[in-house]
Amino acid sequence: EIGKGYNAHFCKTENCEKIIGHYLNKGQSSIHCAFYLIDLESILNVLGNKSKHMDVKLVADESGKNKVKGAKTAKSYGSMHNKFCIIDGEIVITGSFNPKVSELQNDNNIFVIYSDLLAKNYEEEFAELWNGIYGSGEKIKMPALNYSGIIIENYFCPEDGCAEKVSSYLKNAEKSINFLAFSFTSEKIADAMLLNKNAEIKGVVEARGS
């Protein structure tokens, strides 16, 4: 059941288009989204309808049939790979899913968390994107958050050194490393796993990029 707290969803097992629409419809004051690709009519319709009476902003590398009044397109193809929304400054939606027709048959994921602190991190990143700052920007101010006793770490690439952060955990893994990746070309991350002699490592990589 979709509720408050935090929820993980896996497409195609679940209807990610419907799930994103569910949360977007909850918006009362603001919706700020950054998507690499977007052309799903249902999502564009929700954003378009909401934009008529509240603060809705969208940044996309490819905006498709854009019906959203407050929208911007990244200035160069491939410069912005984010996939997140912030709703009312308290709900964050992120994950690997692009709201695009061709993505509906792909294995993806969505993670939703209710946290005004995490939302603040994403709002600051969104403000940079909205102002045309792609591939750079300020380092995150609150990289580690205590969420009901669980530590959540949050970084934005490339300014926060994401490969270094991931590698540090992979190097110190003691039991297992399981990974799924659409594309895998980072030597730093690969070396971190190769040099780990303790953990059992399993991974699945999309065949087109393998």
Image: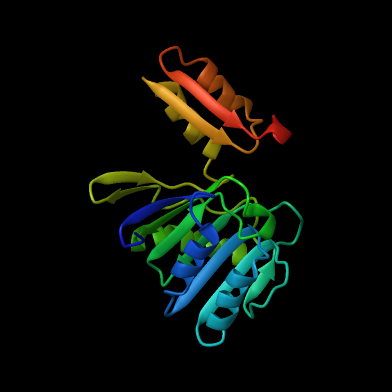
For the C terminus, the image quarter is top right
Identify the residue at the far front of this view: 13
Q: Is residue 68 visible?
A: yes
Does 203 sit left or right of 154 as displayed? right
Looking at the picture, tell me which residue is in the foreground, 102 or 72. 102
Does 7 sit left or right of 36 as displayed? left
**Residue shown at the point (51%, 58%) measured from the top left:** 15
Identify the residue at the far left of this view: 149
**Residue shown at the point (62%, 55%) measured from the top left:** 104
Looking at the picture, tell me which residue is in the foreground, 10 or 169. 10
For the N terminus, the image quarter is bottom left
**Residue shown at the point (47%, 28%) measured from the top left:** 178
Identify the residue at the far right of this view: 76
**Residue shown at the point (31%, 44%) measured from the top left:** 151
The x, y position of residue 112, in whole percent, is: 41, 57
How many numbered discs sit on the rendered protein?
0
Does 150 sit left or right of 39 as displayed? left
Q: Is residue 53 above or below residue 196?
A: below
The x, y position of residue 168, in whole percent, is: 45, 28
Q: Quadrant of residue 70?
A: bottom right
Name the colouring of the figure: rainbow
The x, y position of residue 201, in whole percent, is: 48, 21
Q: Is residue 80 visible?
A: no
